[in-house]
Image (cartoon, grey):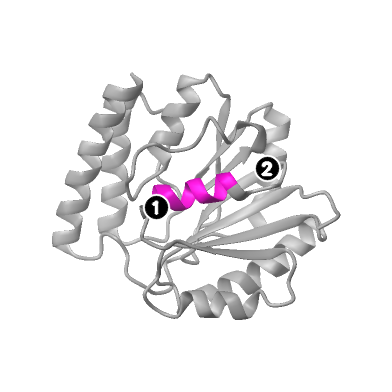
Amino acid sequence: LNKEIIVSVGFCVWNEEEVVLELLQNADKDLKRDFDENFEVIVVDNCSTDSTFKIVSKFIENKPNFSVIKHDYNQLYSGSNNSILIHGKGKFIATVDGDGQHSMRDIKKSIDLLKSSNSKVFFGWKKYRDDSLLRKITSRGFKIVTKIFLKNDLNDINCGFRIFESSLKKKLILSEKVNSAGPEFFCLCRKFKIPYIEGPVIHFKRPSGDGLFNSLPKFISGVFSFFKYVIRLKKKYN
């Protein structure tokens, strides 16, 4: 595209056939309103087993602002974030969960906040969460654990909405292969002394699909895995 790309918005999707079409329709509308044609959307399909890739491929026909990357194998959430950082061409690169919980109306105001605060990385904060009680408790627990072990000062370190200045993307490639990204992004900011800021973002209840912690066994396994992940980060970065 022979135009300046202000922002690359990357969606991490896996088996989101029920929500991905509306997600892309809303993104197209909201990003055109705020950036005219000076944006791109990259959909990273993390080896979905449903019709997600087919739906995305159909939608992006004749849409030069949109592209899709399909992983040959499931590279977990961190791998999807890395793909967005590697392929994004904009001055700013946003990595966003593709499950319909976030609004692209937050992209421009978050970039404006980055500029006005002289920060380089924006972490979203679901200040008013439309989540289940279990997920709210889990989020609070994650915050406490990361504060103790990683000196985390963010309110919502696992929020699936982040924006980076593209000049930093090589420094921010994630080394951990896990279904998480925020804690390592935070550690990398601290390691390289990258100024960051956190701001509130709109949060919608997950429309459908299989949430990571929607059952007790998944909850227990997820909490245990997250704790081990944080310990590894502490050893690696602190």
x 31%, y 29%: residue: 233
Quarter of the image holding residue 110?
top right
Q: Which amino acid does label 2 sit on?
A: Phe
Asked which secondary structure carries label 1, the reply is helix
Q: Main secondary structure of the magenta part?
A: helix
Residue 213 lies, with reference to residue 58, above or below; the image says above
Quadrant where the C terminus is found in the figure: top left
Task: Find residue 36 and report its horizontal and vertical position in percent.
Answer: 82, 60
On the image, the x and y values in percent for residue 57 come to: 59, 76
Left or right: 74 as drawn, with respect to 197: left
> Looking at the figure, which quarter contains the N terminus?
bottom right
* Residue 79 located within the stretch drawn in magenta: yes
Which mark identifies residue 77?
A: 1
153 with respect to 34 (left or right): left
Residue that extends furthest to the front in the rendered view of this protein: 72
Residue range in magenta is 77-86
Residue at image x 50%, y 74%? 53
Instruction: Examine the rendering and report whether any part of residue 95 can be seen.
Output: yes
Judge from the rendering whether residue 22 lies leftward or rightward of residue 173; answer left or right: right
In the rendered image, which quarter is residue 71 located in?
Answer: bottom left
Disc 1 residue type? Answer: Tyr
Query: Looking at the picture, does residue 168 appear above or below residue 211?
Result: above
**Residue 67 x, y percent position in the rendering:** 64, 64
Q: Give residue 177's mark.
A: none
Give the number of the disc on residue 92: 2
Verify whether residue 11 appears in magenta: no
**Farthest residue, direction right:** 2
